[in-house]
Image: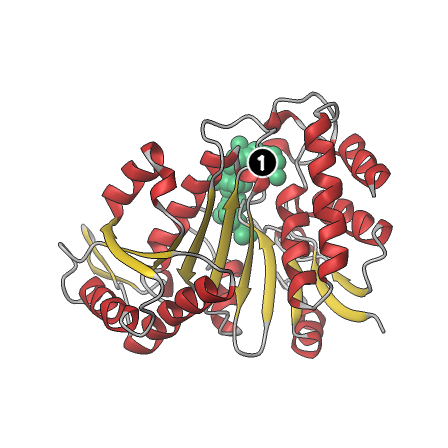
């Protein structure tokens, strides 16, 4: 029987990459039915709601959401809808695997890293207090509960996926109490997993080492803000944002999305790379126990990359997104 999932089409390149991914999923005979919603700025202009109530209801019923990027105004305006969704549905574990494909242009070979990012607190609670007109305090919240569960998730992920090492990324030299708590918990929990190597690294040193020696890393676990930044860095190591998928997992709900944003600079031009959202859909299929279908799509993608004849401009090609989608479907 098909599983019904909720789909948000998003802003910018969101609608076009969503349609591309649904087209490929259909070609792959993914055993899915879709409840599809337009969300974001355009919908707000028309209806006064960024996410229609029916969209929330659908997600609450189906528990699985495939979500395209949504634009967030910078420095002003409403709170990020992405952050809102993660907090509202307690999607506390953000998993972002970065795996290089040897046939695609990137500086390093054999990169296989996973960022495990705490997804509900840290500076992303968005509590900014105007002290006076020249001073703003932003609250960074780190709790034992949220830190404990994300660190355990990183070790469990490592165990389940036969990974060898977990690195805690922090800034406890400066943020002694907040990141200090995260690091302390990491050191305690690591003792429960003696078979997995563990270490800790300050976030700035992590960035330098990722740029020079990415092979030193395997699974990395960190608070929210560092996870956002470090995972974008890992996308740069494997060939760009168009390739990095993610899932946001909670106890009850799961949301799958590309790591990149709505890319307004290329929206509507039919040149966006739908791979990140497609790989996110593969993660979803794997979690739904449809591993064969996910594998079929991954193999088709690999063949298209290997042939290298039909690639979008972000990967050095000259093809449109439609041509890329057609080629993936042909390989299926
Ligand atoms: P972005 O990720 O949208 O774009 C950064 C650069 O990467 C751009 O040059 C863009 O053209 C390129 N790029 C991104 N995805 C691509 C793809 N699939 N194919 C080819 N090129 C791609 O980041 P930016 O411009 O900082 O943010 C735009 C908007 O997206 C902002 O409003 C931001 O808040 C929002 N955003 C939303 C996210 C989400 O919905 N999960 C995540 C990150 C940003």
Tell me the quadrant of the picture where the C terminus can be found.
Answer: top right
In which image quadrant can residue 122 be found? bottom left
Figure quarter occupied by ligand 1: top right
Tell me the quadrant of the picture where the N terminus can be found.
Answer: bottom right
* Foreground residue among 187 and 327: 187
* Foreground residue among 65 and 237: 237
Most extreme residue toward the front, as rendered? 195
In which image quadrant can residue 131 be found? bottom left
In which image quadrant can residue 293 be found? bottom right
- Residue under the image location 69 percent in, 29 percent down: 306
Where is residue 29 shown, x and y percent of the image?
85, 56
Task: Identify the colour scheme used.
Answer: secondary structure
Where is residue 5 shown, x and y percent of the image?
73, 67
- Residue under the image location 77 percent in, 48 percent down: 19
Where is residue 43 shown, x and y percent of the image?
68, 56
Does 271 sit left or right of 226 as displayed?
A: right
Does residue 145 appear in the picture of this structure? Answer: yes
- Residue under the image location 65 percent in, 77 percent down: 60
Rendered position, 62 above or below 214: below
Q: Secondary structure at mark 1?
A: loop
Q: Which residue is mark 1?
A: 101
């Amino acid at each position: 029987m098909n599983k019904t999932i909720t789909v948000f089409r998003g802003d910018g390149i969101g609608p076009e990459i969503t349609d591309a991914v649904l087209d490929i999923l259909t070609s792959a005979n993914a055993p899915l039915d879709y409840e599809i919603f337009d969300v974001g700025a355009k919908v707000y202009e028309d209806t006064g709601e960024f996410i229609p109530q029916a969209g929330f209801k659908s997600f609450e019923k189906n528990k699985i959401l495939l979500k395209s990027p949504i634009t967030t105004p910078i420095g002003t305006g409403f709170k990020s809808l992405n952050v809102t969704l993660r907090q509202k549905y307690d999607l506390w574990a953000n998993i972002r695997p970065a795996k290089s494909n040897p046939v695609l242009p990137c500086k390093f070979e054999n990169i296989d890293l996973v960022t495990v990012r705490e997804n509900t607190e840290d500076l992303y609670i968005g509590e900014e207090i105007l002290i006076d007109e020249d001073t703003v305090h932003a609250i960074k919240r780190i709790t034992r509960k949220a830190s404990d569960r994300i660190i355990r998730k990183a070790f469990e992920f490592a165990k389940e996926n036969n990974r060898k090492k977990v690195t805690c990324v922090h800034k406890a030299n400066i943020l002694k109490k907040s990141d200090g708590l995260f690091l302390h918990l990491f050191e305690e929990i690591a003792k429960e997993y003696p078979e997995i190597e563990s270490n800790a690294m300050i976030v700035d040193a992590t960035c330098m080492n990722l740029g020079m020696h990415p092979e030193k890393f395997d699974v990395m676990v960190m608070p929210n803000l560092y996870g956002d930044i470090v995972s974008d860095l890992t996308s740069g190591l494997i060939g760009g944002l168009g390739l990095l998928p993610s899932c946001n997992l909670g106890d009850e709900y799961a949301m799958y999305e590309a790591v990149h944003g709505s890319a307004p600079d290329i929206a509507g031009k039919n040149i966006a790379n739908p791979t990140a959202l497609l790989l996110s859909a593969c993660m979803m299929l794997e979690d739904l126990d449809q591993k064969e279908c996910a594998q079929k799509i991954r193999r088709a993608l690999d063949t298209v990359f290997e042939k290298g004849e039909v690639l979008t401009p972000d990967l050095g090609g000259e093809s449109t997104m439609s041509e890329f989608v057609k080629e993936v479907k042909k390989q299926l």
